Structures are given as C-alpha cells and as structure tokens.
Image: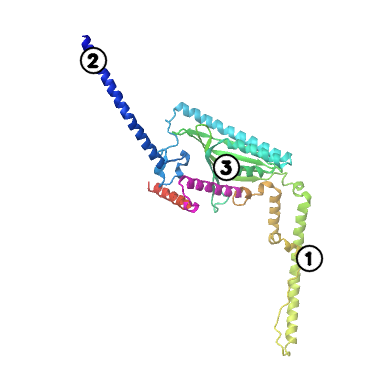
Amino acid sequence: MMNGYNNKKQKIESQDNDSTKNNENNIPNNNNNNNNNNNNNKSFQPLRVPVHLLPLVSDETRSFIVPKPLPTSVSILKPPSYWVRKYLSNMAILRIYEILNMVSLSVKQAISEQGNSDNKKEYSKRVEQSIMVIDKMFAPYGSVHYAISPISSNVKIRTFELSVLTFLFFVKGWINNMVNAEVEMFINNLKAQVLNNGTIYVESNEFTIMKHYPDGSRTIKRFNAKVIFDSWLKIEFLELVRVKSESFASQNALSLKHLNQNQELDQLLQFIIDRNLDKKKSTKRKFDSTNDNENNENNLTDKNKNDSLPFPNYKIDTNLTTKKNNSFNSDKNKESMSNSELITDFIKEKNQCFNLNEEYNTHTNALKQLQLADVMTNLKTLMLYQRINKVESPMDSMFKFVNDLRKRERDMMNK
C-alpha cells in the first residue's frame, strides 16, 4: 500500500514540474506578444475625442476615434426608475427658480453699483462677479440658441448660436447697457422630463423679462424657453425664442416737466414754427419772382431783336437763400422730416423704452453683440474641427467642414 501511495505522489510531483516548465517556457512568448502590441500602438495612435465633440469628427478620421464603436447616446447608463425620474424632474424645476433668483439678484447688484458709484473699476468687478455666477450654471461644453421674432411678418426671424463663452460676452454687454434699469424675471408653466440617457429636459412657454427705466417706462419681453440639464444639474443646452416684445411709456415720462427738460421741447416747437414761416415766405417769393422773370424775358426779347449778337433767352436764378435757410440745411435729417415725425422722434428720444430697433424692437448694440458672438462661436467649432481631424490649412478645414455638414443633411433626408 505504501509503495502505491509513493508512486502516485511521484506522478503528481512530476506533473506539477512539467506544468511549471511549460509555464516558464510560455512567459517569454507572452512578453514578445506584448512588445509586438506596443510597437503596433506606437505606429497607430488613435484619437481620444470627448463625447460631446464626436459630431465634429469627419468620416475619414472616424475609424481612428476612441471610444470605438461610437456610442449612440451620451450616457451608457441604464434608464433610471420612475421615482428617480420624478426626483430629478422636481430638482430641475427648483434649479430653474434658483437660477432666476441668482441672476436677477446679481444683475440688480451690478446695476445699483453703476448708479451709486462713478468708478468704472468697481462696477466692472461687480459685473464680473455676476458673470462668474452665471458661468457656474453651465457645463463647459454647453450651447445657447437665441432667436428673435420680428414685429412685422415681412422680416425674417434672427437666430444666433452661442457657446458658453460668447453667451457670457453677450450677457456682459447686456448688463452694461442697462442704464440704471431694474430687471424682473418671471417663469410659469414649467414642465420637466427625464430622458433615457440621464439628462433632464425642462420647457416653459411663459418666461417674461421686464425692464423698468428711471423715467417710469418699461419693456416686457416674452420667451419660449427650453433647457437641458445634465445629471449634475448643469445646463447643457439653452434655447430662448423671443415671441413678443412690448414697450410702455408712463404718464410721468410723457409729462411736460420730463419732456421740456433744458427747454428742449420749446426749441423744437420754435424750430417747427420758424420752418413753417419760411415755407410761406419762400412760396410768396417764388410767385413774385416768376412774375418778374416773365416781364424781364419779354423786355429782353424786345430789346435784342435788332442786335447782331445772338443772346439766348434765359431765366434768372431764383434759388434764394437766407440765414435761416442755411441753418436749416445744415441739419438735412430735420429738414426732410415732417412735423409729426419730428415730434414722434423727440418723444422716442426722451423715453428710453422706445430707443430700440424698429424691426426687432431690441437695442442695436445688443444685435451687434449677438452677431459678433455668433461669428465667434462658428469660428470656435471650425478650429475644433481642424484640430480634431488634423487639417493643416484653415481654408481646407472650412471646405471639409461644410461638405461634411451637407453630406450629413443628405443622409438625414434619405433616411
């Protein structure tokens, strides 16, 4: 029995020794495989692109992208349960109210600083603080879509695509152009929904911004708002579509005391009266000059009948000018405008709520800042496209970027 046990023990030990030898022989082979893989990785270096920049990848460089294959959604998590969705939707609605309170409070503090102090450095610091508060509400890859509907149906809707940086640039200019106005923000009828990828969609068709000016007038702007939050309640996408804009002048703004500051209204009325008198005098002079011209022409024709030199008939120049006329002609805009247009423009200048663009009912400076921010955002996407796809020439990257967009639009239409 002992001999059989010893024989079995020797067989097991021999099998273990053989296995260890085989493992030792296989170890250098694995190292060789790893070295080969490292050499291949050095020659093939895939691009590591963030998920939010994957739409900028061209079809040519799509095979060199990590992650591979491309995800269909931003988040690969499972859809949350009903109670989690309800909790997140309620938190998103509360976050909207918190954002509005923080923005309105920071803007009020900046405007009050502008009215109380003449130091521009202190005011710029206050504005920078309010912009930092707004910046913390957005994700770094967030985007803003802003649209303005015109007053008349003949004019097109203006749309602007802004990044977070360009949107903050626009907000800074908006705060600087407040002119000591008070801002109030209201939002009602909020609806929230949690999507399968974990983001939260919130919309409202009753978002109102009211601006109260020191002269008592005010403007009311109504928007349709759409917001997408990430799981950390940071804004990924914001859409503001201005549906309606109204301006109202108060009774104080139309009072004689406000309109006749520095006797501006009296000067305007005196200008209108003098212009009407000059028009009457000019019509009388034209009538008298035409009669004198007819008599002079008849005398000249009778006198020059027997002369050898051919004197042609001519008319005396009747462009009579006076000192008042010369002063009026110095301002051609006022001279060409009618009396009613002069009065309406004067009232608009005295009421700050009417100093807006006629087509879109917004400040011209705000439109210029939106256009500049839109161009800067498009240049940023073009630079990212050039860097991701490793295109050397900026012109080539622009053509390729446009061609990729057109190709994707065709693919979407064919689907």
Looking at the picture, tell me which residue is in the foreground, 353 or 256.
Answer: 353
Which numbered dot is residue 8?
Answer: 2
Left or right of 17: which side holds 67?
right
- Along the viewing direction, whichever of 146 and 389 lies nearer the viewer: 389
| Residue 19 magenta-highlighted | no
Q: Is residue 18 left or right of residue 323?
A: left
Which class describes the residues within 10 Å of circle 3: few (<14), some (14-19), or many (20+)?
some
Q: Residue at x 60, y 50 (%)?
A: 368
User: Of the residues tagged 3 and 2, which is closer to the observer?
Assistant: 2
Identified by mark 3, the residue type is: Leu
Residue 323, label in figure: 1
Q: Which residue is mark 3?
A: 165
* Disc 1 + disc 2, Cβ < 8 Å: no
- Identity, as a three-letter code, of the amino acid under mark 1: Lys
Q: How many marks?
A: 3
Mark 1–mark 3 Cα distance, whole angstroms, equals 56 Å
Is residue 355 in view? yes
